[in-house]
Amino acid sequence: MLDLIIIGAGPAGITAAVYAARKKMDLLVISKDIGGQTAWSGDIENYTGYQFVTGPELVAKFEEHMKKNNIALKENEDVIGIEKKKDKVFVKTDKGEYEAKTVIIASGKRSMELGVPGEEEFKNKGLTYCATCDGPLFSEKDVAVIGGGNSALDAALQLIKIANHVYIINIVKELTGDPVEQDKLKNSKNVTIMNEAQVTAVLGDKFVNAIKIKTKDSEKEIPVQGVFVEIGLIPNSGFAKGIDKNEKQEIKVDSYNHTNIPGVFAAGDVTDVPEKQIIIAAGEGAKATLGVFRYLSRLK
Amino acid sequence: MLDLIIIGAGPAGITAAVYAARKKMDLLVISKDIGGQTAWSGDIENYTGYQFVTGPELVAKFEEHMKKNNIALKENEDVIGIEKKKDKVFVKTDKGEYEAKTVIIASGKRSMELGVPGEEEFKNKGLTYCATCDGPLFSEKDVAVIGGGNSALDAALQLIKIANHVYIINIVKELTGDPVEQDKLKNSKNVTIMNEAQVTAVLGDKFVNAIKIKTKDSEKEIPVQGVFVEIGLIPNSGFAKGIDKNEKQEIKVDSYNHTNIPGVFAAGDVTDVPEKQIIIAAGEGAKATLGVFRYLSRLK
């Protein structure tokens, strides 16, 4: 029987896998893709040790690292259920069923998408889902942040220091993020807040050059070179029934990455660990495997 | 006034600094060295994204990363005290005093040393303080683990799968680590446990080739190519008076890296976060700065 199944192959899952291989565990990684959100990140300047690397490049390095350690991988496979029975954890996918002594859930998050024309076409060509990762690339540009909650305001606060002008496109009547942050934005000279405004299309040539906005009584185009979609993230935790989650559907973990079910661990963006960053997810993946190692050591 | 002072320039401190620079904080790093424990690590194969890198090489990359971001650094400076007064944190060193709105303590840990002849000479030449980092380099070799507590047993359990033979040199009457782990070691064919045995010297030529052991009634040499010193780590937290610590003198942090004093954060090995690994410390450093960013955003 396998010692460990890791669900997901983003920074958390891959780091967990490398640590597990080095602990000589019998393991299997099941994931629908390699790299998770990192794969569609733009340029990365905050993964310590790499001054500059693109998302796809970093994913390639992660993948090589995993391959170097001869880690068994089932790719393009979707986990649809997970169940603990006696001392085994059963993982059900769209293609089969697997069992192991332990599981690490590192299935990450996905951004909520706008669902408008042009979004797919301009991903990483001006349209991004991560201001912390990609903001510094838009120096002196005009940009739009889509959303009005805390992550949108956080994105906008980062961008006012970098960009020429920041449009905040908020679908409801008022911003919903923290008032202190709202004040800062309202006092900033290079911000335009548009409430009750809905993005209907992302326009461009090779790169984004405008967004189309619909308000109560008009429809217009705003020229921007960057679009930051910050309307929320959804944890990929739907398959994890019976596992404790917070109100955001993030899996609750303690500082050893235990969930409420013994033998089931979780790491990275799918968990309630604050802040979603590549280096943080990687660290959590390492911590989860070391937690698994302790757990296995204590089994007969 | 500075937004942030970071104490320490290991993986946690440097990652915290890179994140802070990208958030355009006014910051200063104060550290007695660059790289912390990483600088004296041997070969590193578990920092995700680098299949293989030496400790000093990784430190060089970290340092470049920090320099690229124009981060102010006071090196060779020892922090001797820290004090919060009103909304300021004062950091006292052996060379001066600094103040900032916030502080991240990332001063790391140091290994307890044997204090015997040969120890200094053979550091990273067969003698190491980290089985997780360096264990895989001793495939088919004979090694000695010095210590009898949980970290020594953990080291030995890792090494029995890799090394030819593992000697456990324990200074007291019996091992003090978990019984389950003791059993596993006692049932293993390639382990020799020596209780009431004290290492008196590390011997070698270019690399370690033996240790000298003193028992109740004899003194002898045991030929080994590797020596794993696992007699404990000490957090560099002595200067942090008034900050809550656990019984190991590790600084207590919550999941946002807050200490008990508002504006004072901590990250990495100096904290009570379980598991001491480079990638984990780096992730914690990022998390601490994002915590500082939230805190500063909420200040008037």
Image (cartoon, coloured by chain):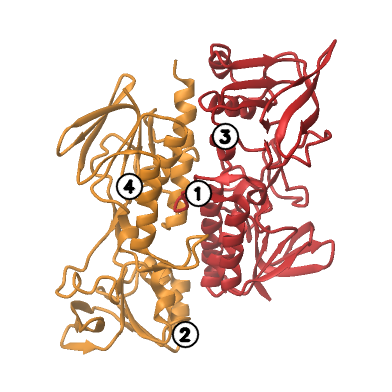
Chain colours: A red, B orange
- The residue where tag 2 is placed is B187
- The residue where tag 1 is placed is A52
Q: Chain of mark 1?
A: A
Q: Are marks 3 and 4 in contact (CB under 8 Å)?
A: no
Q: Quadrant of residue A285?
A: bottom right
Q: Which mark is residue B9?
A: 4
Callout 3 secondary element: helix
Foreground label between 3 and 4? 3
Q: Are marks 4 and 2 in contact (CB under 8 Å)?
A: no
Exactly how many numbered labels are in the figure? 4
In the rendered image, residue B98, in percent from the top left (x then y), is placed at: 24, 29
Q: Chain of mark 3?
A: A
Cα separation, mark 1 vs mark 2, equals: 49 Å
User: Which badge, 3 or 1, comes first in the chain's sequence?
Assistant: 1
- The residue where tag 3 is placed is A135
User: Which badge, 4 or 2, comes first in the chain's sequence?
Assistant: 4
Task: Describe residue B85's horizontal placement relative to residue A32 as left or right.
Answer: left
Vertical side of B164 occupied by A28: above or below:
above
Q: In the image, what residue occupies the spot 66% across and 52% down? A: A39
In the rendered image, residue B16, in percent from the top left (x then y), is placed at: 41, 41
Q: Chain of mark 2?
A: B
